[in-house]
Amino acid sequence: MDAEREPPRRSNPEYPRGPSPRHGSIPASRAALAFLLTALLAPALSPAAEIIEQTIKVPVTLHVPGGAELHQDIAVTIIREAATDRRPFLVLMHGRGASQAERTAMGLQTYPANSRYFAAMGFVVLVPTRVGYGVSGGPDVEYTGTCASKRFADGAEIALGQVRQVLAHAQRLPYVDPDHGIVVGESFGGLVAIAIAASDIRGVVAVVNVSGGDGGDARKRTDEPCRPDQMRETFARYGRANRLPTLWMYSANDRVWGPVYPRQWFAAFTHAGGRGQFVELPADKNNGHYIFNRNAVAWHPAFEGFVGRLELVNAAR
């Protein structure tokens, strides 16, 4: 189940362009985290700096479990301030539609308000529309199985592979600092962000999970996602291999996961060795699962505090 989306954008298929450690150890050096903090807090440009948005094609190769190797281009939207210096990156991961029709209708993922907020902080924002969604199209490679038997990690691994290849491409862009950046994901994208925190991807120094998970349907199974026990075990698996600081944010009235399971998942992650912070966001309208887009000011303080403490996390070790 995915979070609420912006209205689908029908785009030209050519995507026209515009102007190794375990728990307790972090592969990014203390200097890397300090650099990220300094870059984000330094007022390099005025608050009214021009924002540039462009969409490019990035070729990806995927190894789908039980299937053939898949080669395909995906659309990646880049939102950044007009600047000549290299900036830290932020990969913004979208969620997952419950049906093929919903996934097709996702269009080109850009998160206009949130992307501009991140860009104004000094990030180069990279928003991949992954294989199987919107204008990128292709097969549903992130399918995690029936409700009775889920393979959450399989779908997350496919999405993680796309992030890895998008960042490898971004390393060649003159305005991206490839050694300093974070990943932010909502809904299914939040699950992928935690999977990334258990991996080793160049430059990623922290991740943020907003309303993360998979297998939910607020209309048919309010507060009761598919196989929350398997999700708990999946997060525990990521906790055992966790490499980075993580921030988890869930609304008090998330009707996709309910009020209990997100805290259980976070507890499984930390008890297995993961390092993270859980923040309960306020209730939002009839379903707080959509808070990332509908009420961004509710999560801004926690996000800004997390980014501001990245250096302190390392200094305290």
Image (spheres, helix red, strand yellow):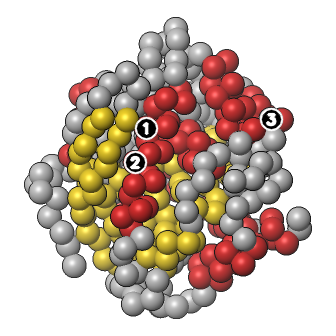
Residue indicated by mark 1: 158
Q: Is residue 138 something one can see in this rendering?
A: yes
Label 2 close to label 1 by CB (< 8 Å): yes
Three-letter amino acid code at the position of disc 1: Ile
Of the numbered discs in the image, which one, if any, rests on residue 228? none
| Residue in the image at 49% along x and 37% along y | 157
Residue 14 picture quarter: bottom left
> In the structure shown, which secondary structural element does the residue marked by tag 3 occupy?
loop
Q: Where is residue 202 drawn, in percent x and y?
A: 55, 63
Outermost top residue: 148
Residue indicated by mark 3: 272
Report how far apart the C-alphas of labels 2 and 1 lie in the structure.
Answer: 7 Å
Residue indicated by mark 2: 162
The first of marks 1 and 3 along the sequence is 1
Up the image or down, 58 lies above or below 238; here it is below
Image quarter (top left, top right, bottom left or bottom right) of the N terminus: top left
Three-letter amino acid code at the position of disc 2: Gln
How crowded pointer 2 is (Cα within 10 Å; few <14, some 14-19, many 20+) is rated as: many
Outermost right residue: 316
Image quarter (top left, top right, bottom left or bottom right) of the C terminus: bottom right
Q: Where is residue 71 drawn, in percent x and y?
A: 25, 43
Up the image or down, 34 lies above or below 266; here it is below
> In the structure shown, which secondary structural element does the residue marked by tag 2 occupy?
helix
Three-letter amino acid code at the position of disc 3: Ala
| Horizontal relation, residue 247 to residue 111: left or right | right
